[in-house]
Amino acid sequence: MSGLTGAYVPGGSLLHRLPAGAKLAGLAASCTALLLLRSPVALTGAAAVVALLYAVSGVGGAAAWAQIRPVRWFAVALFGMQLLFVDLPGAVSSTLRVVLAVALAGLVTLTTRTAAMMACLERRLAPARLVGLDPFRLSLLLSLTLRSVPVVAELASRVREAQRARGVERSVRAFAVPLVVSVLRHADALGEALSARGLDD
Amino acid sequence: MIELADVHVRLGQRDVLRGITVSLPERRVGVIGANGSGKSTFARLINGLARPSSGDVTVLGLDTRRHAARIRRRVGFLFTDPDAQIVMPTVAEDVAFSLRRKGLSREEVEHRVQEVLARYGLREHADHPAHHLSGGQKQLLALCSVMVLEPDILVMDEPTTLLDLRHSRQVADLLRGLPQQVVVVSHDLALLEDFDRVLVLDQGRIVADAEPEAAIGHYRKIMS
């Protein structure tokens, strides 16, 4: 989860200083390149390049691992399946491809402030105005989504604690109902706060 | 200056406020009352988040029904739960969000954000994710995001309810130092002790209106 939300690691590296748009374009281009690379040797080379980029960014090993960690079991399962149905080089290639794509996306998050990303998206989304959508609102929607992930996670852990205290851990309903209620309540409060902060102007 | 003239608020089937008439020129005003007495609605009337069903609310000379947006630009509002009020993923970004339509240069925004974060002791957290802050720090961040706009009036709805003693005291000290007019709804009676005036609400009406000692005394009596 920390890989997605506010994982920005302050720094002054070349990657930090690149504009958000350039990084997003680079991410799109390199993910396409990953799809085109076939041989395990070429992908190992790509892995070295990604490792080098991480080294240049100076975000540190812990931050890098935090990006990969959420897909570790998926990567293991994928490797196993490919090994079973294709062959070893195929398994190595497709697993590396997925892990490297995730690592690259993570690197963009780690070196780009959300505000810079939002400003870039707002500019790119400007054509949406033609069909009556407000680009500012679209980018706000994205930041609110990022902000809501840890908030909802905390609500969920509070509900789980309350369940444990009452000894109804196994009931799905005893988990889902209070969680949905508190999420809705949070949404109401958030809407009110947005009005108070002048979003209706 | 905040003025309410015979204000009634009806939410669904319930009369939340029934005939409130009061004018508040004092710099520090406290509002106390039981749960469901109408305190929060009273606070929300001041920045136009709640509208009167009948009667008028005039804030800084403007009618809240017609000029809600203008009033909100000059009346800051602090909620009980800072998690609902923090809308951006990191600390500095949330404060900068308040300034987004001020037409300031990026350097000026950066400068004001850093200045207000330093004032409330959050400078070293500027680039941290908001969810890494403690409850007290989150409330301070919410306060930063309001104060960076330099509002004329600050309304707080139970600002210390979720805070420990140390952070409550910190908020109380901050309140004392603010140049703005402040209206605070609270169950934290100690917070209001040195206020200029305290209103006691009960079942949608003002039942006491005096300096803190007399008002709090009355509140204790009706609660017993």
Image (spheres, coloured by chain):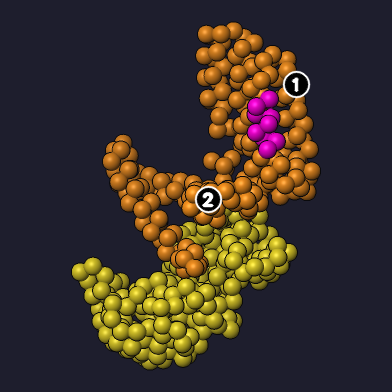
Q: Colour of chain B?
A: yellow
Task: Tell whether position B98 is magenta.
Answer: no
Quadrant, the N terminus of chain A: top right
Between B219 and B198, the one lying in front of the other is B198
Between B223 and B58, the one lying in front of the other is B58
On residue A45, the disc is 1
Are tags 1 and 2 found on a single chain? yes
Q: Please give the name of the residue rendered at 25% of the width and 74% of the height, measured from the top-left corner.
A: B10
Measuring from the top left, give residue B62's x and y in whole percent: 45, 84
Q: Please give the name of the residue rendered at 68% of the width and 38% of the height, measured from the top-left corner.
A: A25
Q: Which residue is mark 2?
A: A130
- Work out whether mark 1 precedes mark 2 in sequence or the reverse, and give the earlier one: 1
Q: Quadrant of residue A54?
A: top right
Majority secondary structure in the magenta region: helix
Query: Is disc 1 in contact with disc 2, using a CB cutoff of under 8 Å?
Result: no
Q: Please give the name of the residue rendered at 45% of the width and 80% of the height, measured from the top-left corner.
A: B183
Between B45 and B39, the one lying in front of the other is B45
Tag 1, which secondary structure? helix
User: Residue flagged by tag 2: what amino acid is it?
Assistant: Leu
Judging from the image, what is the letter of the chain drawn in orange? A
Q: Please give the name of the residue rendered at 59% of the width and 81% of the height, measured from the top-left corner.
A: B177
Q: Which residues, given as a range, are shown in magenta?
A: A25-33
Measuring from the top left, give residue B71's x and y in whole percent: 48, 77
Measuring from the top left, give residue B152's x and y in whole percent: 54, 81
- Give me the C-alpha separation between circle 1 and circle 2: 44 Å
Measuring from the top left, give residue B84's x and y in whole percent: 46, 59
Label 2 resides on the chain identified as A
A183 to B92, vertically: above or below? above
Numbered disc in front, either 1 or 2: 2
Residue A78 visible in the current orientation: yes
